Image: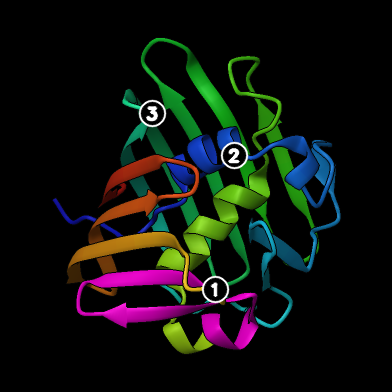
Amino acid sequence: MTNVVLIVCLSLFLSGCSQTSSDSLVDLSQTKTTTQTIQLSKGVYLNVDQIWPLTSTSGAFLQRVKATVAEQENIVTVHIDQTPDQLSFVAFNDLIGRLYALTWTQNKTSWEASDHIPATMIPENIIGDFLLVHLSQDTLNQNLVGAHVVDRGADRLLEANDHTILRKITRRMFSDGIWQQVTLDNPPLNYRLEIETVVAP
C-alpha cells in the first residue's frame, strides 16, 4: 500500500473541536468566501493568498486518522481529492457515518458537518494543519505571522515568537512525492493525530 501525506483529516476533527468560537476568524456558514488568513493558534496566522496553486501531490487518497484528545481516542477515515486548485475532504467512521465534507479553493470554502461534530469545529483548522504538513518550510515561513517553522530531520516544529511549541509534526516514509505516515502533536490544545494515508484505488 502506498501511503500519502495528508494530515488534514483529524486536524479538523481535533483542532477544530478544541478551538473556541471566540478564536474563530470566520463564521460556520456552509459556503462562504475563503478567508485569506487562517488562524493556527492565538496570535498566530498563516496568510494563504500567496500559496495557490498548491504544488504538493495531486490525486485521490484514503486516510486513517487516530485522534487522541485528553486520553480519549477516535478513529476517522477520510477520502481526499487534491489538485493544484482544490482540496476536498470527506470524513466518516463506522458508527456515525459521514462526519463532514469540506471543499476548499482559493475563492470559496464549502462545508457540511454532521450533528456529531462540535459547533466550534471549523474548516480553517483542518486546512491549517494540512498546510503545515505539506507546504515547504520556506513557503510557510514567508507567510506566517507570529510564529515560524523549523525542520529538524523527520520533525517539523511550529514555534511561536515567544518560543512556545504550537505543533510538533513527525513525517515518515516519503515516497512518490508524499509522506506515508504523519504524527501531529498540538501541546497547547493537548491533542495528537496519527495519520496513515494510501492512494485511493
The dominant secondary structure in magenta is strand
168 and 54: which one is in front?
A: 168
Q: For the point 40% across and 40% down, which residue is it?
A: 191
Amino acid type, mark 3: Ala
Pointer 3 local density, CA inside 10 Å: few below 14, some 14–19, many at least 20: few
> Which amino acid does the dot numbered 2 rest on?
Gly
Magenta segment, which residues?
A: 140-160
Mark number displayed over residue 16: 2
Q: Nearer the viewer, residue 80 or 149?
A: 149
Q: Residue 173 appears in which quarter of the rendering?
A: bottom left
Residue 93 % position (x, y): 40, 21
Q: Height in image: 46 above or below 112?
A: below
Residue drawn at the location 29% of the way across and 74% of the way down? 177
Percent position (x, y) of residue 12?
54, 42
Q: Is residue 138 visible?
A: yes
Question: In front: mark 1 or mark 2?
Answer: 1
Task: Tell me the amino acid under the disc marked 1.
Answer: Asp
**From mark 3 to mark 2, how far is it between C-alphas?**
15 Å
Q: Earlier in the sequence, mark 1 or mark 2?
A: 2
Q: Mark 2: which secondary structure?
A: helix
Query: Which residue position is annotated with label 3?
Result: 70
